[in-house]
Image (tube, helix red, strand yellow):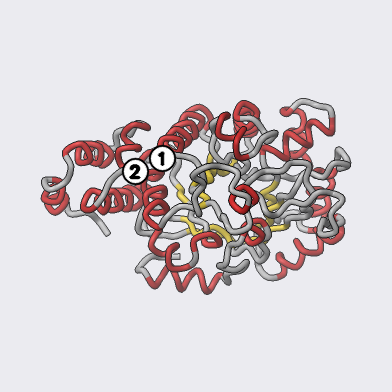
């Protein structure tokens, strides 16, 4: 829907003047500060709905009415991990019976199965096993590319890149070079959560630092390896933490231009250790519907002219909310996934697979083009 300027002006006259000013500047393609973003996060009533209208208009200007998606498969090849992040219900200690580690042959088999079903991408992420061989990630990529040279490998978070470099006793740039030569095409910009060190020390002590996360991302971008960018919200962070996080990602994008999309990830609380054991005062049950809408909309407004694609997570939000998010700034439906273990382990109830025809139906149902 294209905004009628006279209609918008009429609505703005009844809105909070400060909110109207921010949204008018956004519509004029001006950069919106973290402070402005925080103001938008705190809107109610008409102001709240105007944030969604403006985000949707900026989405239309940047990427049009086409909704993108990818036919892919997630391969979480091990749940054994040396870290104990408070939000993760997927990982297991290496001594636990539920721990598993897929052999490379099985990883390749799953990739080939996905390929035969029309997948063009495999997303490879996993835990950090204590006895992992230094060349594990390289071997996985080489084995997949040997069988399917044109399969896109979207693999290994900054946390995994740092771990691989550490196990290999080489620098991050050298390790990324090896991964690229082995067949990695893009990196998932996960393990970001909230890019504030104090916050990370609370929810995931021992996790990759903000400094190291930024180093991995910037180095990858400068080597021609694009990445996604993410933010986990709805736990103990504040709206101020969120807009600072988005602002930091924007600063990185200004320098490197290597982020392909931004993906807000709602905290799935049901089985998360830090929720089950009430480890933090005030911990929430994920973001509310209003939170989810505003997070996608504020991201679109703050990242306008820098990161074109805002992706929603249908696994976390469900099909109907995902349709609504396409009207609140999002334009990318993500992947079909086929298997998704991490969100499901935490309690997500929206399944592990959407067929391409289901995605196309959901998109067309709201008047958009898949």
Residue 249 image point, x, y percent: 49, 34
Q: Is residue 308 left or right of residue 11?
A: right
Residue 84 image point, x, y percent: 71, 43
Position of the N terminus by quadrant: bottom left
Quick one: SS at disc 2?
A: helix
Residue 95 image point, x, y percent: 87, 51
* Residue contact between numbered discs 1 and 2, judged by CB atoms under 8 Å: yes
Comparing 279 with 161, the one in front is: 279
Label 2, on which residue? 41
Counting the numbered discs, the total is 2
Residue occupying the point 84% across, 27% down: 169
Label 1, on which residue? 239
Residue 370 has which mark? none
Q: Is residue 212 left or right of residue 3?
A: right
Residue occupying the point 84% across, 46% down: 139
* Residue 261 visible here: no
- Quick one: label 1, few (<14), some, or many (20+) residues within 10 Å? some
Circle nearer the N terminus (1, 2) = 2
Quick one: SS at disc 1?
A: helix
């Amino acid at each position: 829907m294209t905004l009628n300027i006279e209609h918008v002006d009429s609505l703005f006259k009844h809105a909070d003047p400060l909110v109207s000013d921010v949204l008018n500047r956004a519509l004029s393609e001006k950069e919106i500060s973290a402070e402005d973003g925080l103001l938008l996060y705190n809107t109610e009533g008409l102001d709240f709905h105007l944030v969604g209208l403006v985000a949707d208009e900026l989405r239309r200007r940047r990427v049009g009415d086409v909704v993108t998606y990818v036919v892919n498969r997630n391969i979480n090849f091990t749940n054994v991990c040396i870290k104990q992040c408070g939000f993760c219900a997927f990982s297991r200690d290496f001594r636990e019976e539920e721990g598993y580690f897929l052999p490379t042959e099985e990883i390749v088999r799953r990739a080939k199965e996905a390929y035969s079903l029309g997948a063009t991408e495999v997303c490879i992420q996993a835990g950090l096993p204590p006895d992992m061989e230094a060349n594990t990630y390289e071997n996985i990529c080489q084995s997949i590319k040997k069988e399917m040279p044109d399969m896109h490998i979207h693999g290994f978070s900054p946390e995994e890149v740092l771990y691989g470099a550490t196990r290999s006793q080489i620098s991050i740039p050298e390790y990324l070079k090896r991964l690229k030569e082995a067949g990695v095409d893009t990196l998932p910009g996960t393990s970001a959560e909230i890019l504030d060190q104090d916050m990370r020390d609370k929810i995931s002590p021992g996790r990759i630092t903000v400094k190291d996360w930024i180093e991995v991302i910037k180095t990858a971008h400068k080597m021609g390896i694009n990445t996604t960018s993410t933010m986990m919200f709805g736990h103990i962070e504040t709206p101020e933490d969120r807009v600072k996080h988005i602002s930091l990602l924007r600063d990185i994008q200004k320098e490197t231009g290597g982020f392909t999309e931004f993906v807000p990830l709602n905290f799935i609380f049901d089985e998360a250790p830090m929720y089950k054991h009430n480890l933090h005062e005030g911990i929430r049950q994920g973001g509310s519907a209003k939170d989810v809408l505003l997070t996608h909309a504020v991201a679109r407004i703050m990242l306008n002219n820098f990161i074109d694609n805002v992706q929603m997570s249908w696994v976390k939000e469900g099909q109907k909310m995902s349709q609504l998010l396409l009207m609140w700034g999002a334009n990318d439906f993500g992947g079909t996934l086929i298997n998704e273990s991490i969100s499901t382990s935490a309690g997500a109830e929206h399944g592990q697979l959407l067929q391409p025809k289901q995605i196309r139906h959901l998109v067309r149902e709201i008047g958009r083009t898949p």
